[in-house]
Amino acid sequence: MKIIKNLAFVSIALIPSFAIRCKNFSWCSSPIPFTFLELLILVTFFAWLIWLLYRLRMGKESLSDQLQRLEGPLILPIGVFLLAATISLWGTTDLKGGLGVWKAYFLEGFLLYLVIVDVSLREKDYFWVLKALLISGFFISSVSIVKFLILMKTSGFENAASTRISSIYEFANAVPLYFGPLISLSASFCALQYKNLKERVWFVFAIIISIFMIGAIFLSQSKGGIVGIFSILVFWVGYLISRSLSPQLNKIFKYSVFFAVIFYFALNIFVFLNIGSFAPEGRYVRNSVSSRYCIWEGTKNLLSGGPIQGSGLNGFQQDYKGYKTCLAENYYYPHNILLTFWVETGILGLIAFLWLSFEFIKISLKGENKILTAGLIGAIVYMFIHGSVDVPFFKNDLSIQFWILLSLVTINFKITDKKFNR
């Protein structure tokens, strides 16, 4: 078990290794895209599977015990989510790329989910997962800080301050997309470890990493990321205030949150249905807002021709060429979390994602550790806030991070489950 846990820990800590791709080496050949991170995950999963089969064969545990450990309240929506992704391969204009996306973003993420849940429930501990995530954040944020310092030394502070720092990524917006959920989880980790003298080093480490990550987000100059970080701050302040409210005021607070969620989805639907009124015509000032409107208008045109199936996995970039309006560039995704799931996985995939997100929050609220619950809900709140103008999940690191969040929700629920602990 220790070897399996260490392999899983390394896989999570080295999430940034997705940047090391098979195509970067002349000696590496693969029919579909492949990364070093995927290799780590597959080694971890098969090591766990072999170890598990050995235990079953030796009679050290029964299959029913193992299935009971892995079953959880998210299994059904996860199953539909995976089914929708599989179905979306049918009809995609890029089957090879779609298989790569299905493998890396869905299948392998689910395999890591199984390992994390099993290991954590056996040891009744999930802090090792949080620690590994913090290390991954340290790697990426450190690169941002170092890049900024080098640029400042060679080109001066003003030039460095005006440059968007993208760390290990090809574009700067990817930095906050990964760090946002981590910052919320880091807040939970610090709150849980504050009085634990044995973990004081990790507490200090988490504080330093959080500062690094917030700094990296500001260095990326991502407007969506900065708004997302403030949304986490507002969420945590609201959460802390709600704990001291009277039952009546707490009820009002919950209704306020409910109406905020309704407003979020109503705003997305309104903009989508009326995108023609927002998208610019003729010559216009090019900025991130007008660019989003152009992409969404083209996406609406695309979906109007196939609202059920969408474009299929990895099919948007090719299909979008025939529907783009006021923006000449091609894009991989529509820069909106709801539209992206719709075009990539069809209407079934969008429904499955929303169902999974709803269950994510509902099950999190039933978890025994309310501090971890706050961190998990804050993480998905960030995904939706920043995701209203960008593309969470559909990237190697972001998809794996999402599956890790799902595993933490399951663990937080089951680790105190009376049926599990009997």
Image: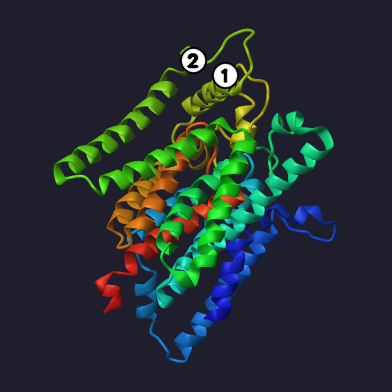
Relative to 353, does residue 320 appear above or below in the rendering?
above
**Residue most extreme to the left:** 248
Residue 329 at x, y = what percent?
68, 25
Q: CA distance from mark 2 to mark 1?
A: 8 Å
Q: Residue at x 49, y 69 (%)?
A: 199
Return the disc, 2 or 1, that comes first in the chain's sequence.
Answer: 2
The residue that mark 1 highlights is 290
Q: Nearer the viewer, residue 318 or 210?
A: 210
Q: Residue at x 74, y 58 (%)?
A: 30
| Residue kind at label 2, given as amino acid type | Phe
Residue 337 visible in image: no
Relative to 284, does residue 412 appear above or below in the rendering?
below
Q: Residues within 10 Å of mark 1 (few under 14, many from 20)?
A: some
Element class at badge 1: helix
Element class at badge 2: helix
Q: Residue at x 26, y 74 (%)?
A: 419
Q: What colour scheme does the image use?
A: rainbow
Relative to 278, does residue 211 appear above or below in the rendering?
below
Image disc number at residue 278: 2
Q: Nearer the viewer, residue 40 or 96?
A: 40
Q: Nearer the viewer, residue 292 or 29?
A: 292
Residue 191 at x, y = what percent?
41, 57
Residue 336 at x, y = what percent?
50, 33
